[in-house]
Image (tube, rainbow, N blue to C red):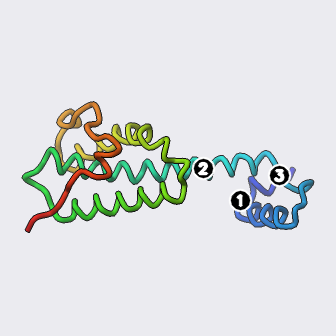
Amino acid sequence: MNKPLYQEDFYAWTVAQADVLRRRSANEIDWENLQEEVESLGRQQESELRSHLIVLLVHLLKWQFQSERRTRGWTHTVAEQRTETARLIRINPSLKPKTEEVLQDAYDIARIRAARETRKTKDFYPVVNPFSWHDAMTIGVEWKD
């Protein structure tokens, strides 16, 4: 028994489905798998937002709770992650209402990563996220030479 193209060669399946869509041949569309993949694309955007926020929160935690170890690199990382986050929201404005929720979800992982990177226990950092969306995107982290 042959496997469906979707299971056997995903890339070939995407090329074939793009062709079917381009030709507007509705009777050839793999509706079930295409629906799953389109939903997956949306989840990927939210996941990308979460990833940027994790990195941002890690550096904000380190900045706030280890001021004696601050580096210029932390400042650059914060700026980069804020820029990437803002870009993602700009090109996917429907993510904006989810930002606070995703930020809170990202905090648990950020806390663990910050602990690992600083060789502290995760209990060194607050259990509750100390940063609102506004704080995370605007709080000052300027490097002073």
Which quadrant holds residue 122?
A: top left
Q: Residues within 10 Å of mark 2 (few under 14, many from 20)?
A: few
Which quadrant holds residue 65?
A: top left
Q: Residues within 10 Å of mark 3 (few under 14, many from 20)?
A: some
Of the numbered discs 3 and 2, the one sitting upstream in the chain is 3
In this figure, which residue is indicated by the disc labeled 2?
42
In this figure, which residue is indicated by the disc labeled 3?
30
Residue 36 is situated, as x and y percent measured from the top left of the image, at: 70, 46
Closer to us: mark 2 or mark 1?
A: 2
In the rendered structure, the answer to whether residue 94 lies left or right of residue 144 reads right
Q: Is 107 rendered above or below residue 37?
A: above
Pointers 2 and 1 in contact (C-beta within 8 Å)? no
In this figure, which residue is indicated by the disc labeled 1?
10
Residue 96 is situated, as x and y percent measured from the top left of the image, at: 48, 47
Q: CA distance from mark 3 to mark 1?
A: 12 Å
Residue kind at label 3, given as amino acid type: Asp
Of the numbered discs 2 and 1, the one sitting upstream in the chain is 1
Q: CA distance from mark 3 to mark 2?
A: 19 Å
Q: Residues within 10 Å of mark 1 (few under 14, many from 20)?
A: few
Closer to us: mark 3 or mark 2?
A: 2
Residue sitting at 34 percent across and 37 percent down? 108
- For the residue pair 57 and 94, the one nearer the viewer reads as 94
Task: Give SS at disc 1.
Answer: helix
Residue kind at label 2, given as amino acid type: Gly
In the rendered structure, the answer to whether residue 2 lies left or right of residue 40 reads right
Q: CA distance from mark 2 to mark 1?
A: 18 Å
Task: Give SS at disc 2.
Answer: helix
Residue sitting at 26 percent across and 31 percent down? 127
Residue kind at label 1, given as amino acid type: Phe
Residue sitting at 57 percent across and 47 percent down? 43
